[in-house]
Amino acid sequence: MNSATRPIPFLFLAVLLTAAVVWAQPASIEPVTTLPSGGYVVARLEIGAGLQDVKDKAAPSSQRLLITLRGGKLANLWFVRPMAGDNRLMVERSTLALTEKSLAGEVELRTTFNRGSPQVTVALKLDLAVTDGKLSGRYEIAADKTPYKSAAGAASGVLLTRPPAEDAVSPKGSWSSFWGSRHDMSCGEQPALVADLSRARPVWRSETYVPTGYGNAPDNRYFTRAIVSGNCGGGSSPVVADGTVFVYFYRPSPQSEPATKGSPFWRYKDDADFQARMAALNATPREVEQLLNHFRPLADDHVVAIDAATGAEKWHTALPLRSPNQQTHKHRGLFGVPLAAGDTLYVPNHASRLYALDAGTGRLKWETPAFTAPDAKASVRPPLTPSPMLIAGNLLVAWGSWFDGKVHALDPNTGKEKWQAPGSYVMRWTCEGKDRLVTLTGLDKRKLSCIDPGDGRVLWQEETDVQAVAPQSAVIAGDMLLAAPPPPRGGPNVVRYEGWKLSADGARRIWQDAEFPGDENVPVTVSGGRAYLLGKQLIRCLDTATGRQVTERKFQQHGPGSNAWLGVVGERLLLSPEGQHGVARLVFPDRDLHDLGLIWLPPHVETTAYNSQPIVYPIVDGRLFIRGGDGVYCYDLRSGQ
């Protein structure tokens, strides 16, 4: 959560508004790794009436409130209730303090009725006694003239100085990349899980504040949204390995001065006009800074390790000035997701750069290319593969464009390039016991290639009419490639998937499916000899070997739409129907699509990515990890917990 701050005058703004240079002083570019100090404590509370919408006519009911403290001071809090769209509660100021005998103080939270409305303050007051690890006392929510109701009453709960044994996450479980550890969006063997996501037990919100994704991000058309939702941090997904959650995001760099002068989007006549507009929005200096952050050209990359049992930060590495500060709602490209491999975390950034970090300490082992100075005109150049791949002793990543991308093979220990070959969309394949890469490259004229990942030799190559322009739009199941030609130009957005048999000599088409309506992209998830195709308000399940339709489910609403995602969880599927417009709901159907279950409104601040690459939700050892709009959240899906 944002650091607690006290209001200060706006006198510093005039300097920022007319900035014509990029650097206020010589830039510091060295990576900085910080480790937390002070004990980490979690208060799990039940409060009498909870945080209730002012328009809610239901009778007040009790609500869970999770508060985490570092060194006796507030780290973050979580009202366990749905918080969709632009609804946020950001900490402005806190006097909350933990002593041997009490947890008491006030937290001032900021929110608004809707985008463009003035900011308002909600105050949470706690006066709790601590007795043998138990908490009891009073709470008050002062929320007059806000979207919420005021409330007061009794509060009770427990104070945890260490996680309960049942919250431990097995280090053997993992979801190590965008695609998971099995590279097929499946989570492997799990304990018995609930069938209804509404029974998921909230465990923690991360100590680390993680910025919103593109789905809720400010845009040049409405940059004042930054006052409400904060700044965008990209569209990455968390990965999990060895009892640790890793997440990558960027933040506008404080070393990169706001480039408001000459900006066609800066709508204020002068400093006086700007200050008057900020006063009309009742914006605090912290909130004004979030708005100015929108116009900083460069961003700092951040990689964070989070304890999977508690949400506590293990380490936090910042890499200054290495990414363009892309503040937009409509990012239509891909985004880097870490790869956890042994003692190393490989992280592709937003500008064709790759980091190797020590997974245990956060220390930067190497980065490529070498970074010597910031480039104020850095462009957005995300990887063509969300996560790198470690195959045949080489670290593989694709950079460039869909029509002329290249696969680069790097030494995983040094980052030194060993070879490169043509390839934009990259898939791994095993042919007669040998590792292979299959790539699709080109837009109008497309080539399908098979590459030896050991030395980069192109083993065969042929022209094809199928394409892949988004993660999971083409997949390999066994020796079958599933992909589709593009929809006809000027015609309806319909797709027809095909099955191509891969061999050591080439590829040949075996089957062709019937047409179905697509959305902006059609993700495909394969598991157990089945392929699940996510069309527009439709899921079609095919036999991968023959193309025979196993089952199909059509939806009137709440079915797959823009940027959907489907994971495999044992005998169930985890469906995110819509991953583009900031509302991240989940459905937990069975593999035969008979029992769809109820759509789940997660009780936290939601966010999504946009257009091409969804945010993925790992399930490890029965725990569900979700990147929300202000942090990573953990839920326990194990039955009986």
Image: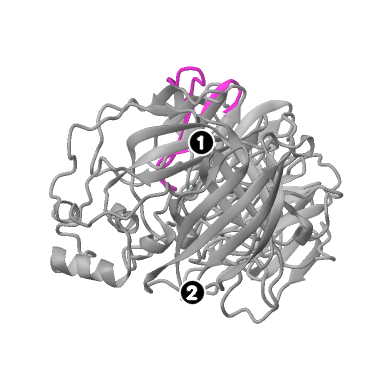
Residue 444 in magenta? no
Image position of 139 with respect to 135: above or below = below
Residue at 43% in and 41% down = 405
Q: Measuring from the top left, give residue 83's x and y in whole percent.
A: 57, 64
Residue 229 visible from this viewpoint: yes
Residue at 43% in and 20% down = 416
> Which label belongs to residue 103?
none
Residue 285 sits in quarter: bottom left
Answer with mark 1 or mark 2, whichever residue precedes in sequence: 2
Image position of 450 with respect to 296: above or below = above
> Which label belongs to residue 304?
1
Residue 524 sits in quarter: bottom right
Residue 496 visible from this viewpoint: no
Q: Measuring from the top left, give residue 357's x and y in whole percent.
A: 49, 25
Residue 324 sits in quarter: top left
Q: Measuring from the top left, give residue 11's x and y in whole percent.
A: 18, 55
User: Considering the numbered disc 2 on the image, is that residue within a helix, a strand or a loop?
Assistant: loop
Query: Left or right: 466 with respect to 429?
Result: left
Query: Left or right: 263 with respect to 633?
Result: left
* Front-most of residues 354 and 410: 354
Residue at mark 2:
144
* Front-most of residues 414 and 482: 414
* Front-most of residues 332 and 542: 332
Q: Amino acid at mark 2?
A: Asp
Label 1 and label 2: CA atoms lie apart by 37 Å
Residue at 46% in and 23% down = 363
User: Considering the numbered disc 1 on the image, is that residue within a helix, a strand or a loop?
Assistant: strand
Residue at 61% in and 67% down = 152
Q: Amino acid at mark 1?
A: Val
Q: Which residues are magenta?
A: 390-417
